Image (cartoon, helix red, strand yellow):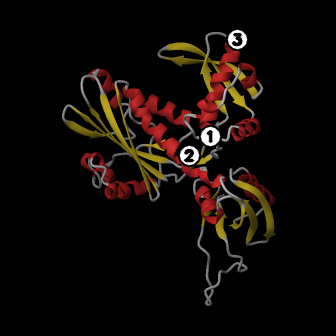
Amino acid sequence: MLKQFRLLFLALSLLSAGVSTAAEIRGLFEARVPVANQGGPERISAFVAALEQVLVKVSGTGSINQNGSLSPSGAARYVQQYRYQSVESDGEQQLELWVRFDEAGIKELLHEWGQPVWGTARPITLIWLAIEQDGQRMLVGANDAGLAREVLRKAGERRGLPVRLPLLDLSDQQKVVPADIWGDFHQPIIEVSERYAPQAILVGRMFPDRGDRWQVRWSLYSGPQTFRWDKDGTDVEALIASGIDGAADWLSRSFTQMQAGDAGSVILNVTGVESVAGYHRVLDYLKGIEGIAAVNLLRVDAQMASFELQANAGAEGIAKVLELGDTMVPVPWELDEGGQTGQGFRGGLLYRLVP
């Protein structure tokens, strides 16, 4: 067990840390499932397993499979495209089935089940993980390598959650030590995390319990909110993945709340729309955001395009979702001497289209 865990510790890097502020997830309606052969019965069963994966990713809810029943024929009707491919697994070639499902059909199914739809713009979550072993506490960084890298990669892909690990370079080491993570000291962790510009921070402390059992304690910081949960057991890989599972459950619940309630009007102004292509890019992006019921163009000129959005969460909810995407960024209004907003005195939200 100790040898296994040492290999695991070398691997706790999911992705090299970056400084991007958000991620728009691709492939939410796609899944890959191992299959024994290309026969019809095997393929139909794989369709069900693949659809279950997609429902979890799109809804953001780990328990989605308990909310409805899927017959093999029912799953097949949502299949848009599929193909077989050979991949290497544990040094051997494994046959798997890649499946893409109909986006509109999946969203309709979730709505029928009373489940949310989590949009493609999702919060990047920075993971600080400290592990106690042989009386020492070590931090896990983005440049580690080994078994858990694949475990975390698959967990993040399975839940549709973009995650990062810190570089643990000199800059990080000057600001944070394992004791800060172990004690879950909020302020030092928040300050050192600023360079990575995450929308959420996941802090984990993992340590041996008794016999071959381990415990892990997680804290998730998302804006002013803090969520905590514990996990224990002998399956070390499952304990590591429990951090991503818990974070995805909490974050999806938070970011899909804007779908509830009655739609209200929000004015959104976008600068940098310098062509017809730019206008359609903004329009398509807004129409693809869950929780926006309608998008109406109010005015367009050389300075900006103004839209009226019918949304369920008001200006605050819209800003919260737009913050996650990489299509546009917020900019402050310019005020004249009388304290009025410039650019036509339109008011509302002001964003700039990213080239």
Where is residue 240 shown, x and y percent of the image? Answer: 40, 33
* Residue closest to the eye, 54 or 353: 54
Front residue (pair 258, 92): 258
* Residues under numbered marks 2 and 3 in contact, where contact means CB atoms less than 8 Å apart: no
Q: Is residue 191 above or below residue 121?
A: below
Disc 3 + disc 1, Cβ < 8 Å: no
Asked if disc 1 and disc 2 are in contact, CB closer than 8 Å, the reply is yes
Q: Amino acid at mark 1?
A: Ser
Percent x, y for residue 177? 26, 49
Residue behind mark 3 = 41
Name the quarter where the C terminus is drawn.
bottom right
Where residue 267 sits in the image (x, y, percent)?
71, 68
> Where in the figure is residue 21, as x and y percent of width and height?
52, 54
Question: SS of the residue at dot 2?
Answer: helix
- The tag earlier along the polypeptide, 2 or 3, is 3
Q: In the rendered structure, which disc, 3 or 1, sits on the residue that comes first in sequence? A: 3
Identified by mark 3, the residue type is Pro
Q: Is residue 21 left or right of residue 329?
A: left
* Cα separation between marks 3 and 1: 28 Å
Q: CA distance from mark 1 to mark 2?
A: 8 Å
Helix, strand or loop status at disc 3: helix
Which residue is at 24% across, 48% downward?
179
Left/right placement of residue 210 relative to residue 268 reads left
Q: Is residue 231 visible?
A: yes
Mark yes or no: residue 286 visible: no
Near-viewer residue (115 or 14): 115
Q: Residue at x 73, y 37 (%)?
A: 103
Instruction: Classify the position of the N terminus by image quarter.
Output: top left
Look at mark 2 in the image and give the residue it sits on.
252
